[in-house]
C-alpha cells in the first residue's frame, strides 16, 4: 500500500504531456528568448563558478546540466536554473573546509533531500516566509556577492579564509601594498557599462558586451595585470562518482541540508516572481522542488556545483517573451555549444571583468524602493529586515533565514497577544426584569462584568491574569467569553488560576458564552469543572447576571425576590 502511494506520488511529479505541448505554441519566440538568456547567463555562470572556488568550468557545467534538467522536470514553464550568487555564498566555506570533492558530494546529497521534500509535498510551506525576511535575505546576499568580488576586482590573489569580511579586508591590505589599477579599471568599467546600459536600453545584454570589450582591451593592449580565467576543457567531462567519499557523508549532512534549504527557498521565490510577471502562468511548487532535486543529482556528476533557479535570468527570460520550457532548454543548449566550440576564447576573459559583472549583478539585486517601503511599514518589519541582512552577512544564509523567521514569528505573536483585551462593561443593558435606580446601584456595588476580546493564549495570557487578579473588592465577577477568538492550554490554566485566586478572596466567578472550541482546553486543565461544579457557567450574559443576583440574595446582600403566590383556581 505504501509502495503504491510513493509510486503514485512520483508519477505525479514527473513531466506531463501538457508540459511539452506548450512548447509548440510559439517556438520562435522561445528560441529567441533562450538565446538572449544564454548571452546574459554566460558571464554569470563563469563568474559564479570562479567565486565558488571550483573554477569557471564548474559554473558552465552547472548552467548546462542543471539548466536543462530543471527545465524538463521543474514545476515552472519560465524558470532558468544554474549557478547563483546565493549558492556561491554557501559553497565558499564548504570548499575551504572539505575541498572540491566535498562540494560535489554536498550537491548530490542536496539533490536527494530536495526530491524527498517534493515527495513530502513541502513546496506549499515556502509561501509563509514573510516579505521582510526575503528582502533582508536578498540584501545580505547582494552584499556578500559584492564583497566576494573584491579580490578579483583589485587584481590580488584570494586570501585564505572562509569569512567574507575577513577575506575582503585582507584583499584590501594586499592591494594597498601592491596596487593593481588595471584590474580595478576593468572591473569598474564593466560594472558601469552594465548599470548604465540597463537604464538606457534594458533589452540589450550589456553584460556580454562589457565582457567582450574588456577581453579585447586586455588582448590589444597586453594588460598583463588583468589575469584571465585560464584554460577551459572543450566539452563536458564524462559522468563520474570519483569525488564521492562515503566516509565523509556524515560530516557533510549539515552543509547538504543548508544547500537544499537554500535551493528550495531561492527556486520557489524565483518561481513566484515569474508568476507575478505574467498572466496565466502558475508554477507547481512540489514539481519545482523535484526538478531542482534531479538537477542537483546530475550536476555534480559532470563537475558542476549545486544549482538553484536564478531570479535575474528568469526575469530576463520572461521579459524577452518566453512562454514555455523551450526557452530554458535553448539557453542550456547554447551554453553547451559555447563550451564545445569556444572554450579557448572564453578562457581569455579577465577575472576582473567577471568581478565587474557580479558587482553590477549584486547592485541590481537590491530593490531600494521595496526595502524603504518595508522599513517604513512597521518597526517590526524593519527589525526583521535588518536582522536578516546582518545575519546573512555575518553568519550564513540558512542561519539568517532561521533567525529572521524566529524573530518575525516572535514579533507576530507579540502583536497578536497585544490584541487581547479585557474591558469592564456595563451589565445594565443585559439585566433581566424591571429594576429601579436604587437596585441598579446596589447591584453595581457588588457585581463587575468583564468582556474578553481576542486570543487568550500563551503569549499574552499572564497579562490577563494580572489584570483579573487586581479586581476591586466586589462579590461577583462575570466573564463574558463569547468574543475570545482562540484559547490554548496556557490560556485555560491562567483562567483557572484567576478563578481560584478570586474564589479564595470570597469573590464568585461566573462565565457566560463559552464557545464549543474553548471547552476542550478548559476541560483538559480542570477549569470547566471548576465553573460547572458550582453551577457558575451560563449560556448567555442575562442568565449569568440573574445567577449573580441570586448568589447575592443567598448571601444576604440583596433583598430576596418577593414570592408570588399562585392564584387559586
Image: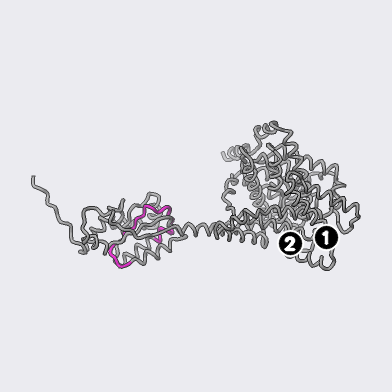
**Looking at the picture, how far across and down is residue 323, in whole percent?**
68, 37
- Name above or below for residue 332 compared with residue 414: above
Quarter of the rendering containing residue 150: bottom right
Under tag 2, what secondary structure?
loop
| Tag 2 near tag 1, CB within 8 Å | no
- Is residue 172 rendered to the left or right of residue 553? right
Q: Write the start and end of the magenta stretch as one range.
A: 472-494
Distance between mark 2 and mark 1 Cα atoms: 19 Å
Looking at the image, which residue sits at the far left?
A: 568
**Looking at the picture, how far across and down is residue 348, in whole percent?**
86, 51
Looking at the image, which residue sits at the far front?
A: 200
**Looking at the picture, how far across and down is residue 472, in whole percent?**
32, 67
- Is residue 297 rendered to the left or right of residue 432? right
Residue of label 1: 155
- Of badges 2 and 1, the one in the foreground is 1
The quarter of the rendered structure image containing the N terminus is top right
Task: State the mark number for residue 128.
Answer: none
- Counting every numbered tag in the picture gives 2
Crowdedness near tag 1: few (<14), some (14–19) or many (≥20) residues, C-alpha within 10 Å: many
Q: Nearer the viewer, residue 241 or 458?
A: 458
Under tag 1, what secondary structure?
loop
As for residue 202 lying within the magenta part, the answer is no
Q: Residue at x 30, y 61 (%)?
A: 448
- Name above or below for residue 568 compared with residue 151: above
Residue of label 2: 162
**Looking at the picture, how far across and down is residue 341, in whole percent?**
85, 42
- Name above or below for residue 335 compared with residue 404: above
As for residue 474 lying within the magenta part, the answer is yes
| Residue 476 in view here | yes
Quarter of the rendering containing residue 95: bottom right
User: If you read the primary sequence from the N terminus, does the residue marked by circle 2 or circle 1 appear first?
Assistant: 1
Crowdedness near tag 2: few (<14), some (14–19) or many (≥20) residues, C-alpha within 10 Å: some
Amino acid at each position: 500500500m505504501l509502495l503504491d502511494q510513493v509510486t503514485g506520488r512520483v508519477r505525479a511529479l514527473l513531466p506531463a504531456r501538457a508540459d511539452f505541448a506548450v512548447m509548440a505554441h510559439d517556438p520562435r519566440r522561445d528560441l529567441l528568448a533562450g538565446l538572449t538568456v544564454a548571452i546574459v547567463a554566460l558571464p554569470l555562470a563563469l563568474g559564479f563558478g570562479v567565486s565558488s572556488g571550483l573554477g569557471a568550468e564548474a559554473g558552465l557545467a552547472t548552467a548546462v546540466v542543471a539548466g536543462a534538467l530543471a527545465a524538463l522536470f521543474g514545476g515552472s514553464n519560465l524558470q532558468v536554473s544554474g549557478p547563483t550568487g546565493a549558492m556561491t555564498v554557501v559553497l565558499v566555506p564548504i570548499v575551504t573546509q572539505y575541498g572540491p570533492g566535498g562540494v560535489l558530494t554536498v550537491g548530490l546529497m542536496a539533490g536527494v533531500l530536495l526530491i524527498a521534500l517534493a515527495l513530502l509535498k513541502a513546496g506549499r510551506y515556502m509561501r509563509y516566509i514573510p516579505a521582510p525576511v526575503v528582502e533582508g535575505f536578498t540584501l545580505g546576499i547582494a552584499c556578500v556577492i559584492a564583497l566576494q568580488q573584491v579580490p578579483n576586482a583589485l587584481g590580488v590573489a584570494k586570501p585564505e579564509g572562509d569569512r567574507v569580511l575577513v577575506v575582503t579586508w585582507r584583499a584590501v591590505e594586499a592591494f594597498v601594498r601592491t596596487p593593481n589599477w588595471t584590474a580595478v579599471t576593468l572591473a569598474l568599467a564593466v560594472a558601469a557599462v552594465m548599470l548604465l546600459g540597463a537604464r538606457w536600453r534594458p533589452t540589450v545584454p550589456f553584460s556580454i558586451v562589457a565582457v567582450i570589450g574588456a577581453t579585447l582591451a586586455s588582448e590589444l593592449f597586453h594588460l598583463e595585470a588583468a589575469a584571465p580565467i585560464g584554460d577551459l576543457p572543450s566539452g563536458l567531462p564524462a559522468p563520474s562518482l570519483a569525488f564521492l567519499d562515503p566516509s565523509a557523508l556524515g560530516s557533510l549532512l549539515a552543509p547538504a541540508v543548508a544547500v537544499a534549504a537554500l535551493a528550495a527557498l531561492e527556486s520557489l521565490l524565483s518561481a513566484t516572481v515569474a508568476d507575478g510577471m505574467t498572466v496565466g502562468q502558475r508554477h507547481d511548487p512540489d514539481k519545482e522542488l523535484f526538478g531542482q532535486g534531479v538537477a542537483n543529482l546530475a550536476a555534480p556528476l559532470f563537475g558542476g556545483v549545486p544549482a538553484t533557479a536564478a531570479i535575474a535570468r528568469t526575469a530576463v527570460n520572461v521579459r524577452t517573451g518566453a512562454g514555455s520550457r523551450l526557452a530554458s532548454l535553448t539557453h542550456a543548449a547554447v551554453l553547451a555549444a559555447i563550451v564545445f566550440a569556444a572554450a579557448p576564447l572564453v578562457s581569455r576573459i579577465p577575472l576582473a571583468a567577471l568581478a565587474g559583472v557580479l558587482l553590477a549583478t549584486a547592485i541590481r539585486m537590491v530593490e531600494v524602493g521595496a526595502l524603504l517601503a518595508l522599513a517604513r511599514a512597521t518597526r517590526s518589519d524593519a527589525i526583521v529586515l535588518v536582522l536578516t541582512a546582518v545575519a546573512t552577512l555575518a553568519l550564513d544564509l540558512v542561519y539568517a533565514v532561521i533567525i529572521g523567521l524566529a524573530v518575525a514569528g516572535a514579533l507576530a505573536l507579540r502583536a497578536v497577544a497585544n490584541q487581547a483585551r479585557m474591558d469592564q462593561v456595563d451589565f445594565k443593558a443585559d439585566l433581566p426584569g424591571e429594576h429601579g435606580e436604587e437596585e441598579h446601584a446596589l447591584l453595581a456595588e457588588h457585581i463587575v462584568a468583564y468582556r474578553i476580546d481576542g486570543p487568550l493564549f500563551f503569549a499574552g495570557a499572564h497579562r490577563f491574569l494580572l489584570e483579573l487578579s487586581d479586581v476591586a473588592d466586589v462579590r461577583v465577577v462575570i466573564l463574558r467569553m463569547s468574543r475570545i477568538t482562540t484559547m490554548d492550554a496556557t490560556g485555560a490554566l491562567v483562567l483557572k488560576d484567576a478563578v481560584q485566586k478570586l474564589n479564595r478572596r470570597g469573590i464568585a466567578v461566573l462565565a457566560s458564552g463559552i464557545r464549543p472550541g474553548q471547552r476542550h482546553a478548559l476541560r483538559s486543565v480542570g477549569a470547566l469543572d471548576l465553573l460547572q461544579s458550582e453551577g457558575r457557567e451560563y449560556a448567555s450574559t442575562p442568565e449569568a447576571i440573574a445567577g449573580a443576583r441570586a448568589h447575592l440574595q443567598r448571601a444576604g446582600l440583596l433583598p430576596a425576590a418577593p414570592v408570588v403566590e399562585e392564584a387559586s383556581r
